[in-house]
Amino acid sequence: MNAYLSDLESSRHGFDPSPVLIAGDGESALARAARSVEASGMRIADQVLVEAAPDRIERQASASALWVELDRDGGEPMDRLLSLVNRDAAAGRYAAVISARSEMLDALAARIDDSAVELIIDADDAERAAALAVAIASRSDPLRVADAAADKNAARLRQLSDEVSRIASTLARLSAGPGAAIRPVEAPPPNVPEVSAETVRSVIRARRLRSRYFSEGLFADPAWDMLLDLLQAEIAQLRVPVSSLCIAAAVPATTALRWLKSMTSQGLFIRRADPHDGRRVFVELAPETSIALRRYFAEVGSVVAI
C-alpha cells in the first residue's frame, strides 16, 4: 500500500489525478456513490461490495480517495472495512469519505476516530460533493489547498476551525481561573462551583423554545448546544453516545459530526469506548472544559444564559 500516490504526486509526474475507489453494501449504494464521484469530476477506479473491499484496497496501486457508501449495518465485514479505512486515512494513504444513514451513526463512530475521514450522514448532493473535495484537499500541500479556498464549503470549514479554537481558548482561560496559568486538570479542584442539573436543563429548554417562533437555523450554535448537553449529562452521571450528542446539537448530523471532530481534536471533548459494547463510543467533557462551564454558570448567576 506504500504505492499509493496523492493527486499532487500524480500531477508532478504528468498524470491525471488518481481515480476514486468505491465500496458499497449493495447495487443502489454503489450507484449513488458513483453519481457523486462523477459529479465531482473524478474518475472511478472500481466499484466493489463491502465484503471484497479490504482485499481490493490492498491491490489498488493508486487512488485519490476511497468512498464507502452504506445503507445498512453490515456487521463484522463492515467493521473490518471501517477499521482499515480509519487506519489507512490516519497514515495518509488515501483520502476517505464514508456516507451512511443516521441509524448507523454509533456503529460508525466506534470505528472511525481519525479526523482524516470525512463521515457524512443522510447527506444531500452538495454535502457529498463537499466531503469529497475536503477529503482530497486535506491530503494536498498548501498550494493545492489554496485552490479549494474559494469554495464556500471550504470557507465554512475554516470558520468552524477558527470558532472551535476560539472556544477552546476561552474555556481554557475560564478553567484556569483569573490570572492562573493554564495547565491540564486531572480532577476538579474543591473550589469548582456547583451547578444543578435543573439550571442547565432550563437553559436547554429556553434554547429549544426559540424554534417555536423563529427558524431553527437562525440560532444554530452546535458547539454551545453540545457543551450544555454534556454538562447536563455529567451532572446527572449519564453517558452520552455520539448519536445522542448529534441530536442535541440541533443541526444536520454531518454538521454535528464535524463540530464533534473539531472539538475533540481541540481537547474540549473526550471519546470513551463503551466497555460493554464494542460498537459504541461515548463522549464526555474534558476535565478543564467541565470546570470552565461550571465557573461560567457561577459567574452569570441567576441570569438566563441562553
Image (cartoon, helix red, strand yellow):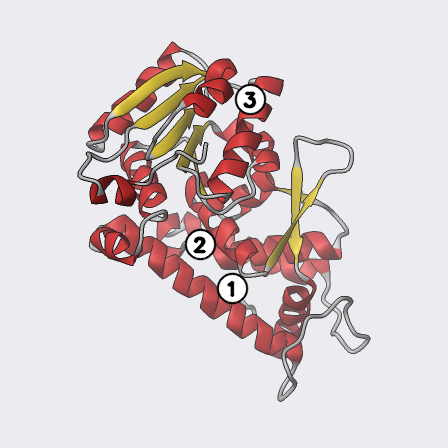
Height in image: 84 above or below 180?
A: above
Q: Which residue is mark 2?
A: 210
Crowding around mark 3 (Cα neighbors within 10 Å: few <14, some 14 to 19, many 20+) is many
Percent across and percent down for residue 10 are: 25, 39
Compare marks 1 and 3 and give the one earlier in the sequence: 3
Q: How many marks?
A: 3
Q: Which residue is mark 3?
A: 78
The reply to whether callout 1 and callout 2 are in contact (CB within 8 Å) is yes
- Report which quarter residue 94 is drawn in: top left
Q: Amino acid at mark 1?
A: Ile
Q: Tag 2, which secondary structure?
A: helix
Marker disc for residue 24? none
Q: Is residue 191 left or right of residue 10?
A: right
Q: Depth-wise, is mark 1 or mark 2 nearer the camera?
A: 1
Percent across and percent down for residue 195 are: 72, 67
Q: Amino acid at mark 2?
A: Arg
Report the front residue among 273 and 48.
48
Q: Depth-wise, is mark 1 or mark 3 nearer the camera?
A: 3
The reply to whether callout 1 and callout 3 are in contact (CB within 8 Å) is no
Percent across and percent down for residue 259 are: 47, 52
Measuring 57% from the left and 31% from the top, which residue is drawn there?
A: 83
Crowding around mark 2 (Cα neighbors within 10 Å: few <14, some 14 to 19, many 20+) is some
Height in image: 156 above or below 47?
A: below
Report the front residue among 235 and 157.
157
Q: Tag 3, which secondary structure?
A: helix
Measuring 50% from the left and 57% from the top, which residue is drawn there?
A: 223
Q: Amino acid at mark 3?
A: Met
Q: Which residue is mark 1?
A: 306
Q: Tag 1, which secondary structure?
A: loop
Height in image: 125 above or below 258?
A: above
In the rendered image, is residue 45 in sight? yes
Compare marks 1 and 2 and give the one earlier in the sequence: 2
